[in-house]
Image (cartoon, rainbow, N blue to C red):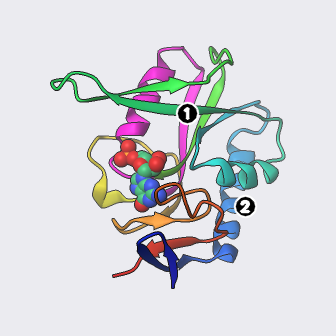
């Protein structure tokens, strides 16, 4: 049991299975993109550890960059609008792999996909370390999923609770 601020978390995915799964995902990328030069786009902040470990196990030619998604409340009718920040690379005709830490409702990823697709990449695939299928609210094709998990709040390995817990080397889940 671990306390982060006012909440208690219990172990969920230990470092060993976590790293083994990430190596397997990297192998899939090595196979699927053999002879190509994909551009990995990590979504900050949560994905930084995952992308780092994944990248070390990719042994084909491959580039990496990072984006951040800002969200702000615009008008009441349009709700929350998300903007991609920090993409300096020209992604036209590139093979893109978006790398996320977790897909929950899927709205963030749907928005990112829409905005990146408008820049005419050669292909776009989506990889997420964690996926909560029962929380998904929009149609979304996920090409690489590390672990499908229950709809519970998790921290660690880059994921935070109110800014804390990102430094944990395993995934922890909110206790009952
Ligand atoms: P979505 O747009 O898919 O609902 O949400 C994606 C974002 O919500 C993730 O990038 C992450 O920042 C946050 N999120 C969703 N579920 C969790 C969770 O269980 N734990 C943490 N730490 N963040 C989450």
Reply above or below: 175 against 139.
below
Q: Which residue is labeled 2 in the image?
A: 23
In this rendered view, identify the residue nearer to me: 113 or 94.
113
Kindly state the secondary structure of the residue where label 1 is placed: strand
Mark nearest the camera among 2 and 1 is: 1
Residue at 28% x, 41% y is: 138
Reply above or below: 87 against 109.
above
In this rendered view, identify the residue nearer to me: 89 or 148.
89
Reply above or below: 65 against 94.
below
Residue 67 lies, in percent from the top left, at 59, 31
* 149 inside magenta stretch: no
Kindly state the secondary structure of the residue where label 2 is placed: helix
Visible residue check, residue 9: yes
Quarter of the figure that contains the C terminus = bottom left
Reply above or below: 15 against 95.
below
Visible residue check, residue 131: no
Name the disc covering residue 68, or none: 1
Q: Magenta span covers which residues?
A: 103-130
In three-dimensional space, the C-alpha distance between marks 2 and 1, rounded to whole angstroms, equals: 25 Å
Question: Dot 2, crowdedness within 10 Å: few (<14), some or many (≥20)?
Answer: some
* 112 inside magenta stretch: yes
The answer as to whether callout 2 falls within 8 Å of ligand 1 is no
In this rendered view, identify the residue nearer to me: 134 or 44.
44
Residue at 64% x, 74% y is: 17
The answer as to whether callout 1 falls within 8 Å of ligand 1 is no
Q: Do the residues under discs 2 and 1 have CB atoms within 8 angstroms?
A: no
Question: Dot 1, crowdedness within 10 Å: few (<14), some or many (≥20)?
Answer: some
Question: Viewed as shown, does residue 34 lie left or right of 76?
Answer: right
Question: Viewed as shown, does residue 83 lie left or right of 119?
Answer: left
């Amino acid at each position: 049991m671990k306390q982060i601020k006012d909440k208690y978390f219990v172990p969920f995915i230990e470092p060993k299975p976590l790293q083994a799964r990430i190596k397997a995902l990297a192998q899939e990328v090595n196979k699927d993109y053999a002879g190509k030069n994909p551009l990995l786009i990590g979504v900050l902040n949560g994905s930084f550890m995952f992308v780092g470990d994944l990248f070390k196990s990719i042994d084909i030619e491959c580039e990496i960059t990072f984006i951040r998604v800002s969200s702000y409340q615009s008008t009441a009718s349009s709700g929350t609008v998300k903007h991609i920040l920090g993409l300096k690379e020209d992604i036209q005709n590139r093979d893109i792999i978006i790398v996320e830490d977790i897909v929950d409702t899927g709205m963030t990823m749907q928005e990112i996909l829409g905005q990146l697709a408008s820049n005419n990449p050669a292909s776009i695939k989506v990889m997420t370390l964690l996926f909560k299928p029962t929380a998904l609210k929009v149609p979304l094709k996920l090409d690489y999923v590390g672990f499908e998990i229950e709809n519970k709040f998790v921290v660690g390995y880059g994921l935070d609770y109110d800014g804390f817990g990102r430094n944990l080397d395993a995934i922890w889940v909110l206790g009952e």
